[in-house]
Image (tube, rainbow, N blue to C red):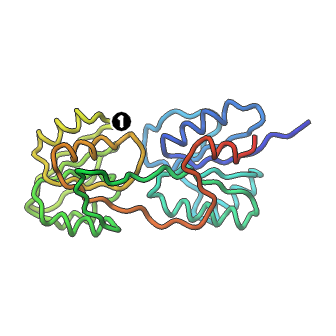
Amino acid sequence: MTKNKKILLLGGTSEAVELNETLARRSDVDLITSLAGRTRNPTLLSGKTVVGGFGGEEGLVNFIADNQIELVIDASHPFAGKITQNACAACAECGIAYLRFQRPEWKQEPGDCWISVSSVEGAAKKACDFNRIFLTVGRQELLPFEGISGKFFLVRSIEKADFAPQQSEVKFIRTRGPFSKEDEVRLLCEYRIDLIISKNSGGTATYAKIAAARELNIPVTMIARPVLPDCTSFSDMGALLTAVGL
């Protein structure tokens, strides 16, 4: 009897949900899906899940050994650089295959006004030149903006955000994408936004804000992705599944 292939899927993205659904349906796969646990009500997944991380590279090495994992598929967020670094290194140490799904970046199009920066800290420095700022960098990346005073901040996140810059007004919106361009245009107009700050996450779920900014001639401070380790990576889901070899 042929034994099932034991796969660990590192989740946290819509692509990970798609992979979870595809792999969990297979009778020749034993799938474990991992979530970092940063969202209290994540999308329901099929099969066995683990929540809360592994305790760094060493913890992941131990988990791989204890569960006899043969393949790690990394479909974590493009900005979850530490997770990817740990996973790539742990797989190399354990001598097992590692495949990463990396969704394509957003590309600047005619009419876009992007201010390119390499970090959230760099984005905070650029924000000083604007007055009404739409912060869409995630609730865990707000600290660099705490020292900016005399501004209006619109902060959108899935979970409750802790953000209280001195002498600045903050409006919190808790919601989950995807968003339509029409809704984003209305939002930007309602709050008279003159700058959007965004990570270059790629994908379709939150791209509407970029299209809305283009339509309204609003500049976007675009934070570049972290540099990831050299590893086997795919931007096409079909090609990744073919590489899995099932």
Q: Quadrant of the C terminus?
A: top right
Instruction: Please tell me whether residue 43 is drawn above or below residue 229 in the rendered image.
Output: above
- Residue 144 position within the rendered picture, expressed as x and y whole percent measured from the top left: 26, 66
Q: Nearer the viewer, residue 232 or 136?
A: 232
Instruction: Please tell me whether residue 175 is drawn above or below residue 67 in the rendered image.
Output: above
Which residue is denoted by mark 1 in the rendering?
Answer: 178
Left or right: where does residue 245 sit relative to residue 163?
A: right
Q: Residue furthest front?
A: 110
Residue at 16% over, 52% down: 153
Q: Residue furthest right?
A: 1
Q: Nearer the viewer, residue 228 or 111?
A: 111
Left or right: where does residue 192 sit relative to residue 154?
A: left
Q: SS of the residue at dot 1? A: loop
Left or right: where does residue 92 sit relative to residue 141?
A: right
Q: Quadrant of the N terminus?
A: top right
Residue at 34% over, 56% down: 199
Left or right: where does residue 75 sit relative to residue 159?
A: right
Q: Nearer the viewer, residue 32 or 40?
A: 32
Q: How many marks?
A: 1
Residue at 21% over, 63% down: 146
- Residue 56 position within the rendered picture, expressed as x and y whole percent measured from the top left: 58, 64
- Residue 205 position within the rendered picture, expressed as x and y whole percent measured from the top left: 38, 39
- Residue 231 position within the rendered picture, expressed as x and y whole percent measured from the top left: 62, 63
Quarter where residue 50 is shown: top right
* Type of amino acid at the residue the image marks with label 1: Pro
